[in-house]
Amino acid sequence: MRQSALFSNTLREAPSDAEAASHQFMLRGGFIRQLAAGIYSYLPLGLRVLHKIEHIIRQELEHAGAQELLMPALQPTELWKESGRYSVYGPELMRLKDRHNREFALGPTHEEVITSLVKNEINSYRKLPVTLFQIQTKFRDERRPRYGLLRGREFMMKDAYSFDASWEGLDRSYKAMYEAYVRIFQRCGLVVKAVEADAGAIGGEGGTHEFMALADIGEDTIATCNACAYAANLEKAHSGSSSERRVSAQHGTVQKIETPDVRTVEQLAQYLAISSQAVMKTLIYAADGKPIAVVVRGDHEVNEIKLQNHLGVETLELADAQTTKAATGAPIGFVGPVGLNIPVLVDFAVLQMEAGVCGGNEVDAHYTNVVPGRDFSVEQAGDFRNVTAGDPCPHCAEGELQLMKGIEVGHVFKLGTKYSEALGARYLDANGREQTFIMGCYGIGVSRILSAIVEQSHDGRGIIWPQAVAPYHVHVIPVSVKDEAQMRIAHELYGLLRSRGIEALLDDRDERAGVKFNDSDLMGIPVRIVVGKDAGNGQVEYVDRRSNEKQALLLDDAIARILANVEGA
Ligand code: 9G3
């Protein structure tokens, strides 16, 4: 491709609202342009990368035995009413009416559609197992779209769905998809960790994993062990700390102390010159509207996913000041578990506390010498907190957990019969009896992968595309278009490369060398060939974009090295 004709402009700087490096570089490099919040056009450079990622996905999914199909984006909302999800999703589900005033949703995912399709196409166990996938635009009206393609309102997803006649079959389908994912992300040049995850609203009976691209900009936090393979989303991660109460010393009785206007854990720790680990932090929640108290150690945070899963409630939210006062008699900041007449859930780590300080359920008052089990009931003890760095690993004896940020680029679920049951999707087994399909679903955020790769693979000057997904394999840059020898050699090289199937971008623009090199750094094509003053005696400069290593080579050697680099991708 000749760059003078390429539909793409580089930008000197990114708009101020582009905070993530990938967002900035993909705008400045001429890969994407925003049409509206969370809605983007892919310019030719961006689309070439997207297509390469899709190609890798298709190869690996078909290698794993999945078949590609394409479902509509427009979904009759009757299907969502049938599955019971119509009321679960609020404004995030984009709805519209057709000319007959019938309501449709723009598909955020396709469990309902695929299940109704398979229900009508498969009625015998002989046709199982089958795994179907599509690569298609999804719509989710995110409240706060941001970071470019990382959290968009219209995005590209590969979603696959497996249908089996048994749970063992589902395990096999799940394993095949899991392994395909590992290969896909490895081929895309992404550093990814598979972590145990929480199934969330999608439900399903049997486990789920998320594939996290490690990056500081990631919105997810994962806990990984520094000694074994344990890794889990913070929503689900637990620690190896023991859950048994051990009381060694005797403690004096509870004392009420004056703590005027001392409301937060930090203020309390400072006021009493104690560690926050000696504080019993008590929060009041409304669980399906009913008040409950949760007690965690002062330096820990409540994990609301674990809490909600433990309680099995539909809604869970922090109680406001009024609800808190009604439930405890105290304003927020002076709440404690002693003498409450609402359920008190106690995190295991609080059981390890000999004695501690907690709110006095009275304004400006706290209790000291509070002993769990003696001064308040610990009947409902459980794991209600986020793990913290340094916690013991729950799987191996010697490891410690460390926390890191990740971008969720893949998510695989064992759904079971949640959707096939709801939509009455059944087949006849070998004995002619009706059975319900056992399903799995598997997603990859295809457009999100572009951003995740850039987050992991850029430097101060711009993107560094892994060769397997780069928009072009090599960037041929004649230093001066006015130098006849340089242009002749550059065009000759460009022609030779293309004849060898190498995707080359020729910078034939009449621009200063500095501009060309800055643009090339921004666009991130992994190999650059500079045709400069030595062109006359057949020498060009081979530049590796990642290492910035430069080497003078004869033309043929440069071509050989490019071929080797592309073959190795
Ligand atoms: C919705 C809306 C947003 C959603 C969903 C439904 C996330 C929803 C979870 C999944 C589960 C899997 C198949 C591919 C892999 C992921 N956000 N999820 O179901 F209506 Cl508005 O999408 N789906």
Image: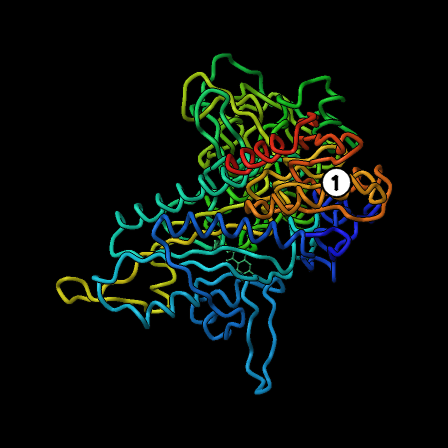
Q: In the picture, residue 441 is in which quadrant? A: bottom left
Q: Where residue 541 appears, x then y in whole percent?
A: 71, 30
Residue at image point 56% right, 38% down: 213
Q: In front: 107, or 538?
A: 538
Q: Where residue 522 appears, x then y in whole percent?
A: 75, 41
Q: Can the viewer see residue 96 in this picture?
A: yes
Q: How many numbered marks, from 0 up? A: 1
Q: In front: 361, or 417?
A: 417
From what the image shows, is residue 75 above or below residue 14? below
How packed is label 1: few (under 14 Cα within 10 Å), some, or many (20 or more)? many
Residue at image point 59% right, 28% down: 297
Q: In front: 148, or 383?
A: 148
Q: In front: 40, or 378?
A: 40
From what the image shows, is residue 209 above or below residue 97? above
Q: In the picture, residue 420 is in which quadrant? A: bottom left
Residue at image point 70% right, 43% down: 22
Q: Which residue is mark 1?
A: 477
From what the image shows, is residue 259 above or below residue 325? above
Q: Is residue 161 left or right of residue 331?
A: left
Q: Can the viewer see residue 339 in this picture?
A: no
Q: Where residue 339 appears, x then y in whole percent?
A: 57, 36
